[in-house]
Image (tube, rainbow, N blue to C red):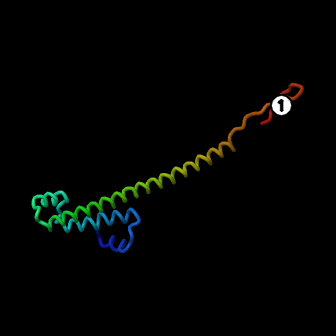
Amino acid sequence: MGVGLRAQYAGQQLLTGQQAEAYADHFIAQHITDMSGGKTYSQLSAASMAQPNNTKLSGLVATVFKGETLRSMLLNAYGWWKVSQITFIGSLIAFGLAGLAFLASLASLTLGKTPEIIHEVIDGTPVTHT
């Protein structure tokens, strides 16, 4: 995690998708990489199965598993937060377009051509009102 991101979100509760992404990608991921020496969970797990009596390695595997699980949950939250942001923007655009359509329909009703009305008077002569 860059120093800027650490300082920006230090001591805060994770409430936004941006915070979740920053914590997952720049804090947890970095610590997992530092602990595991750059090895993946799969590589560590295979090494641990090959050395069943190595408690330090099995503890590391459990810690990396928990870290990757937490990281995946945070990134999932970030992804759905991003979807909600896009949906919100789309809804604002849709409401704006609906408002414009409503105004256009009012304008066409008000300014549109009115039909010609023809009345007949009693003597049979048509009277036109425009």
Image quadrant occupied by the C terminus: top right
Residue at screen point 30% across, 59% down: 72
Query: At numbered mark 1, what does the secondary structure look like: helix, strand or loop?
Result: strand
Position of 121 relative to 106 (above/below):
above
Question: Relative to residue 49, is residue 23 depicted above or below?
Answer: below
Residue 17 at x, y = what percent? 38, 62
Check the picture and name the quadrant holding the N terminus: bottom left
x then y, percent, for residue 112: 68, 40
Question: Which residue is the site of mark 1?
Answer: 127
Nearer to me, 111 or 12? 12
Among the 4 quarters of the image, the one containing residue 86? bottom left
Counting labels gives: 1
Q: Residue furthest right?
A: 123
> As rendered, which of 107 and 33 lies closer to the eye?
33
Q: Residue at x 55, y 49 (%)?
A: 97
Residue located at (34% from left, 57% from top): 76
Question: Seen in the image, is 60 located left or right of residue 106?
Answer: left
| Left or right: 93, with 7 as reference point | right
Q: Is residue 122 left or right of residue 87?
A: right
Q: Quadrant of residue 16?
A: bottom left
